[in-house]
Image (cartoon, helix red, strand yellow):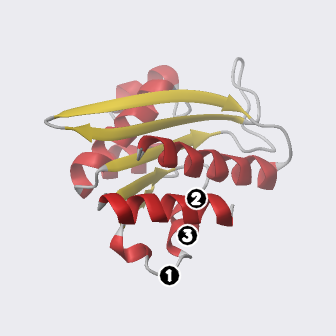
């Protein structure tokens, strides 16, 4: 993970771009990982940990109807989290993460290990958002660790 973090930092420093995060199942682990690196204040702007549905709604404006309809672990929710984090932080890039780390919480069609990601970036006046779902194997810690690593790599790709 350190190598991925250092690569991301070098890319952001070279471009002058900034990052913000919106996390649920990782509980701030990604923001912590990003800020573990000395000098990250040059490119890390803000991070939200919106663990509950109420926090997703209150802090980043996810509509309650969207949360009720598809659940927090869904493409529309992570897309909204990523867009709102981008808008509210002023960053160039954001990542949003929402998933089921386990051991409980699985629902039909969403087993433990299901994690949705959305990567948002500014393109002139437009905002481009890409969303992807992953299914990670392992216990709670493994799912969360793999989600953080996937997010780091996705930010690196977004920042290119």
SS at mark 1 in the image: loop
Q: Which quadrant of the figure contains the C terminus? A: top left
Relative image position of residue 122 (x, y in whole percent) = 25, 41
**Which circle marks residue 32 in the picture?**
3
Disc 1 + disc 3, Cβ < 8 Å: no
Relative image position of residue 26 (x, y in whole percent) = 61, 54
Residue at mark 1: 38
Which residue is rendered at x = 56% and y = 76% of the image? 36
Q: Could you tell me how far apart the alpha carbons at marks 3 and 2 are, in whole angstroms?
A: 9 Å
Q: Could you tell me how far apart the alpha carbons at marks 2 and 1 are, in whole angstroms?
A: 21 Å
Residue 38, placed above or below residue 124: below
Residue at mark 2: 27
Which residue is rendered at x = 36% and y = 62% of the image? 14
Res 46 seen here: no
Q: Could you tell me how far apart the alpha carbons at marks 1 and 3 are, in whole angstroms?
A: 12 Å
- Residue 51 lies left or right of residue 119; in this view the side is right
Relative image position of residue 72 (x, y in whole percent) = 51, 34
- Residue 154 lies left or right of residue 125; in this view the side is right
- Residue 136 lies left or right of residue 7; in this view the side is right
């Amino acid at each position: 993970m350190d190598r991925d973090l250092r690569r991301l930092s070098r890319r952001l420093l070279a471009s002058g771009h900034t990052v913000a995060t919106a996390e649920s199942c990782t509980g701030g682990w990604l923001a912590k990982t990003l800020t573990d690196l000395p000098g990250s204040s040059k490119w890390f702007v803000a991070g939200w940990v919106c663990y509950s549905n109420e926090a997703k709604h209150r802090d980043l404006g996810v509509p309650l109807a969207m949360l009720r309809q598809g659940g927090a672990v869904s493409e529309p929710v992570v897309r909204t989290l990523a867009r709102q984090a981008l808008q509210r932080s002023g960053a160039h890039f954001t990542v949003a993460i929402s998933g089921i780390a386990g051991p409980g919480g699985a629902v039909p069609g969403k087993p433990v290990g299901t994690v949705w990601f959305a990567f948002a970036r500014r393109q002139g006046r437009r905002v481009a958002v890409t969303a992807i779902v992953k299914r990670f194997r392992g216990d709670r810690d493994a799912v969360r660790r793999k989600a953080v690593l996937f997010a780091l790599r996705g930010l690196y790709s977004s920042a290119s």
